[in-house]
Amino acid sequence: MTETVQPEVTVVIPCLNEAKTLPGCVDKALAAFRSSGIRGEVVVSDNGSTDGSIEVAQQHGARVVHATLKGYGSALRKGIEEARSEFVIIGDADGTYDFDDVPRFVQKWREGYEIVMGNRFQGGIRPGAMRWTHQYLGNPMMTALLNLMFHTGIRDAHTGMRGFTKDVFRCMDLRTTGWEFASEFVIKATKLGIRMTEIPIVLGPDLRGRPPHLRSIPGAWRNLRFMFLFAPQWLFLGPGIGLVAVGLTLVFWLVGGKRYVGHAALSINTMIFGMIFALLGVQIISIGVFAKAFSYSENFDRNERSLERWLTRVSLEQGLLAGAVLMFIGLTGDVWAFWHWAIRQFGTLQDDQVRLVIFWSLWFFIGVQIIFSSFFLSMLGISRRTYIGDSESR
């Protein structure tokens, strides 16, 4: 293929010191292009190799680009940006993926799919190709969690071989640099409603004869951390609502007096813990709302139409009013309790009085939290041009 011919497919291979296995990957991809009559190119995205990988790649017919930022995701992004075709297929340089499968990815693209994922569990994993902890625990659990949180419907979300159009890749606006790149890819594709499919592929053993660059536990943690940060409703809102529910239940249950669970007596101390749970829950919910607003305004989560409607309907003044009402109710109750304490010449507080102080103080503190949270949410929206609570500005 000459430089003047526009390729229709690009195979992008991220590379960091892969001189031993890279030639076979490049040769297979180019051979697949020739055998299937596809106009294609191979782009090797080098991430700082020092073992001659660059020279080997060029000798075997690949075009080399240089990713200056370290990381698997950074190398992939650079290679994809430099691709001259409409459809891109990515695959690792360690010999584990069979680039003879390239035409099958292209076929699915021509059928109208914008993303084609290779499924290793459907196609087969050869002996020694994947650690048993990854095959039976890590990958299945991560994919199951991804589907639970984001409903992707993909059965092998962390495969290293996948194809997609450059337009789709631009729309996804991927940000991550490590192993979590694979999760971000699938999550954003799902949220954008992109048409995806999977095809079975075979995963072979690593042919490099050395440990992989990726460290399993740190990589898995980064992936898990990303998923939770991308879904504040799981990290913040769910636990926060749970704590508020438990806290308020305890407070309302105990405000009338001592309760018994079996032979255990629950009274003021338990009520105090209920108050703490409720306040902690409100704080966590507030942080979750801030995170959702930030995620939306930064285009990190573009499919939050319900959030957009809510943000424009709830104004700063409404938040301040709700907080002020709760604060006033709580303050009134505390003043009433203080007045009765003063009538008794500030003697020892009885248990029923302590319960009332806890009850009314809870609403006072929640009101204060809502007021300051409303101010911060409004400031966050203005600084990010989300115009929270100002539908006329949209």
Image: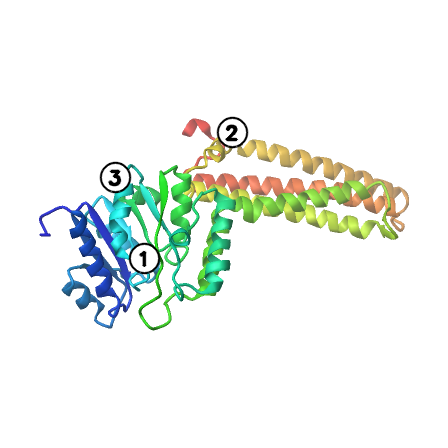
Instruction: Judge whether 362 appears above or below 63 on screen.
Output: above
Residue 8's place in the image compared with 320, above or below, is below
> Could you tell me which residue is drawn at 76 percent across and 45 percent down?
250
Q: How many marks?
A: 3
User: Which residue does the numbered mark 1 point to in the structure image?
Assistant: 74
Q: What percent of the width, then of the height, locates residue 205?
A: 35, 65
Image-based side of 227 in relation to 374, left or right: left
Q: Nearer the viewer, residue 77 or 294?
A: 77
Residue identifier under label 3: 110
Determine whether the residue tagged by mark 3 lies in a helix, strand or loop. helix
- Using the image as rendered, state which of residue 382 and residue 144 is in the foreground: 144
Residue 363 in the figure: left or right of residue 24: right
Check disc 1 and give the amino acid type: Ser
Viewer-side label of 2, 3: 3
Figure quadrant of residue 246 = top right
- Of residue 374 and residue 104, the one placed in the foreground of this image is 104
Helix, strand or loop at disc 1?
A: helix
Tag nearer the camera, 1 or 3:
3
Task: Tell me the distance, in whole angstroms, between the alpha carbons under discs 2 and 3.
Answer: 43 Å
Q: Is residue 169 left or right of residue 386?
A: left
The three-letter amino acid code for the residue at tag 3 is Arg
Residue 63 % position (x, y): 17, 58
The image shows residue 325 at horizontal and vertical percentages of 67, 33
Q: Which numbered disc, 2 or 1, marks the residue that appears first in the sequence?
A: 1
* Whether label 1 touches label 3, CB < 8 Å: no
Work out whether mark 1 precedes mark 3 in sequence or the reverse, and give the earlier one: 1
Q: Which residue is mark 2?
A: 313
Badge 2 crowding class, 10 Å Cα cut-off, few under 14, some 14 to 19, many 20 or more, is some
